[in-house]
């Protein structure tokens, strides 16, 4: 039996040994900052779950590896020799870099014939419109520009090469599609609808949604599959988008698990493990 390496809590070591004794599969969740363990606490079935910052524990001790952050994915991509081949599924470095940068992702969509599914950028927009940073999470560094005074207030950001402007898509409903893709096929697809009270909002920490529910958006699944297959995307991701006149407008793709995946975590893990074992 493999022994756990350094920086392992005593209570985790006990759980690990019990899991091995009972032939329960172990999953190591790798992340950057604390918080995911609380989000998934007591939700995971069929596996014994462990949560550690990447680089702090020997991954070869575990049956499966799930990177929860982009930094963890990049760590695996750079140190593949440390990880058993059939223990994880991650996007390529190209996919991570392209998807993590909102402007690069837009340019990729435009180049590959998907521009109709993305809001316009860097044009002369009516108010309101968005000023957003190329790279960001949880709605940070995105601003709703409603008038000329706000344009003056964010003058430095407008001049920065790290920011771009984007068309504001109206509507109180925003959607998150949680996806697992392998061999250019989507094998896991769950969508949540978030409804907001505010007329103008940015999904994230600043604005709280009024309601949340799972919905069937299988009609849009082929679009996401086509986008992911053009870049040979492997692993977990999530799309944020709105629907206007039965057409989707994608704000971003996160090349990592979205936090609301916790509502489907056991179904997702089953598909994730299948993608590793069967393909």
Image: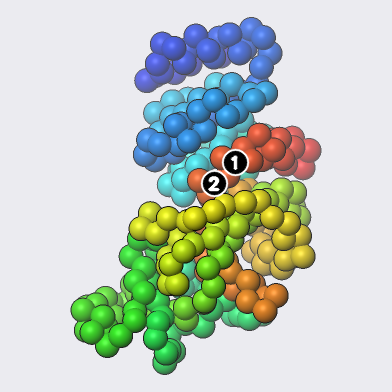
- Residue 42: image x %, image y %? 54, 25
97 on left or right of 214: left
Q: Residue at x 47, y 81 (%)?
A: 167
Q: Nearer the viewer, residue 162 or 165?
A: 165
- 191, above or below 130, in the image: above
Q: Identify the element where label 1 is drawn.
A: helix
Mark 1 and mark 2 in contact (Cβ < 8 Å)? yes
- Residue 94: image x %, image y %? 54, 60
Q: Residue at x 67, y 79 (%)?
A: 245
Q: Which residue is mark 2?
A: 260
Q: Identify the element where label 2 is drawn.
A: helix
Is residue 242 among what the camera can see? Answer: yes
Say the numbered circle drawn on residue 107: none
Q: Which residue is mark 1?
A: 263
Q: Quadrant of residue 141?
A: bottom left
Looking at this rendering, what residue extends furthest in the bottom direction? Answer: 124
Q: Residue at x 27, y 83 (%)?
A: 151
Q: Quadrant of residue 175?
A: bottom right
């Amino acid at each position: 039996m493999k022994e756990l390496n350094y920086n392992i809590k005593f209570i985790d070591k006990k759980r690990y040994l019990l899991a091995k004794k009972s032939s329960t599969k172990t999953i190591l969740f790798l992340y950057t900052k604390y918080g995911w363990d609380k989000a998934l606490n007591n939700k995971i079935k069929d596996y014994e779950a462990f949560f550690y910052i990447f680089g702090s524990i020997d991954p070869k001790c575990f049956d499966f590896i799930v990177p929860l952050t982009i930094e963890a994915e990049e760590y695996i991509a750079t140190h593949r020799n440390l990880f058993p081949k059939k223990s994880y599924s991650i996007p390529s470095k190209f996919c991570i870099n392209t998807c993590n940068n909102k402007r690069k992702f837009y340019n990729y969509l435009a180049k590959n014939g998907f521009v109709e599914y993305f809001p316009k950028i860097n044009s002369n927009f009516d108010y309101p419109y968005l000023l957003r940073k190329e790279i960001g999470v949880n709605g940070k560094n995105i601003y709703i520009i409603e008038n000329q005074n706000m344009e003056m207030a964010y003058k430095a950001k407008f001049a920065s090469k790290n920011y771009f402007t984007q068309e504001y898509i109206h509507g109180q409903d925003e959607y998150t599609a949680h996806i697992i893709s392998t061999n250019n096929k989507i094998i896991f697809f769950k969508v949540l609808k978030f409804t907001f009270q505010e007329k103008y909002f940015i999904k994230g920490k600043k604005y709280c949604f009024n309601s949340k529910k799972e919905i069937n958006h299988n009609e849009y699944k082929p679009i996401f599959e086509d986008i992911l297959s053009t870049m040979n995307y492997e692993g977990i991701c999530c799309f944020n988008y709105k629907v206007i006149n039965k057409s989707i407008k994608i704000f971003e793709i996160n090349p990592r698990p979205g936090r609301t995946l916790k509502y489907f975590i056991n179904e997702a893990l089953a598909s994730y493990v299948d993608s590793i074992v069967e393909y």
